[in-house]
Image: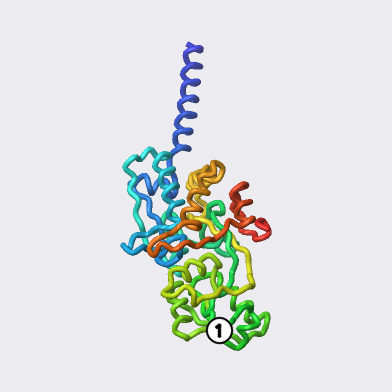
Amino acid sequence: METRIRLIAASAVVAAFVAGTVAAQAPTGALKKIKDSGEITLGHRDASVPFSYLDDKQQPGGYSMDLCLRVADAVKADLKLPALKVKNNPVTSATRIPLVANGTVDIECGSTVNNIERQAQVGFSVTTFIVSTKFIAKNASNLKTLNDLKGKTVVCTAGTNTLARVNGLNAKHNLGMTVLTGKDHAESLLIVDTGRAVAFFEDDILLTGLAANSRNPSEWAIGTEAYSIDPYALMLPRGDAAFKQVVDRALTDLMKSGEIMKIYEKWYAKPIPPKGVTLNFALSPALKKAFAKPTDSPDPAAYE
């Protein structure tokens, strides 16, 4: 009888352990939401060329969108959901953080800098790209440096970290610039194109993409100075370790296998829609390092 009682007790312990293990493995956070709904929602931009933008058929695509689709495949496999539906949801510079934070969007596939301030509201994947802040102006204006912009009107896109950076530069160097805001990158460029401002500050690769797809690319010139080095990453719900693990694993696998370079070349070295322009944006040493040793650090020094 005593032996039987011990066996029953031992079986109960094993059962409790197995139940606890199963419970521990049950999806939580974004993964649970995705499994329950049968769909994953990707946040996309409309004019962040070549990361996330609408083509001539108003369909979202780009470098970040391709990465997110690989993440969706990983989520599909992880949750054993062969019929997982991918839903696209538009976001802007101003709405992207709240829409990720409130769960409307599961992952933002855009051109978002991972920094300490944003980490108070959202989470980030490993770094997917590295940029520098510069400005773009009309060739005819012959504006090359920050000093050339003293007393002039410039523009930044609302909701970007670039806006705060430019306001800081304006105050630090006593430039006396008037800083306007556009609702998105396309409007910011239009403000310069129509003469309401002389320069538009943004990330160098976004300025390259906007100029290449403009009415007359030869009219535009990007300034010679860089005012930052910033890591881009896919934006995730804050504190969702299980979802971040799946996302980071999918991205790290792309980087370690070298597959990431095929995606990079597709968007930065070959003709891209809608006009078939080629950006010819070379892989930087900093990004090459980030691909070789994936990191989610928001510290610019980690990429120098």
In this rendering, the answer to whether 252 lies above or below 186 is above
Out of 290 and 296, give the one closest to the viewer.
290
Front residue of 163 and 31: 163
Residue carrying label 1: 141
Q: Secondary structure at mark 1?
A: helix
Q: Label 1 crowding class (10 Å Cα cut-off): few <14, some 14-19, many 20+?
A: few
The percent coordinates of residue 202 (x first, y second) are 54, 71
Q: Residue at x 50, y 58 (%)?
A: 268
Quarter of the image where one finds residue 108? bottom left
Q: Is residue 254 visible?
A: yes
The C terminus lies in quadrant: bottom right
- Name the amino acid, label 1: Ser
Point out residue 83 in the picture as x, y percentages from the top left corner: 31, 42
**Residue 71, image x and y in percent?**
45, 47
Q: Which quadrant holds residue 107?
A: bottom left
Q: Residue at x 63, y 67 (%)?
A: 228
Question: Which residue, as the protein is rendered here, is positioned at the far front?
Answer: 218
Residue 119 in sight: no
At x 34%, y 45%, the residue is: 84
Of residues 194 and 83, the one drawn nearer to the viewer in this rendering? 194
Where residue 142 sits, quadrant-wise, is bottom right
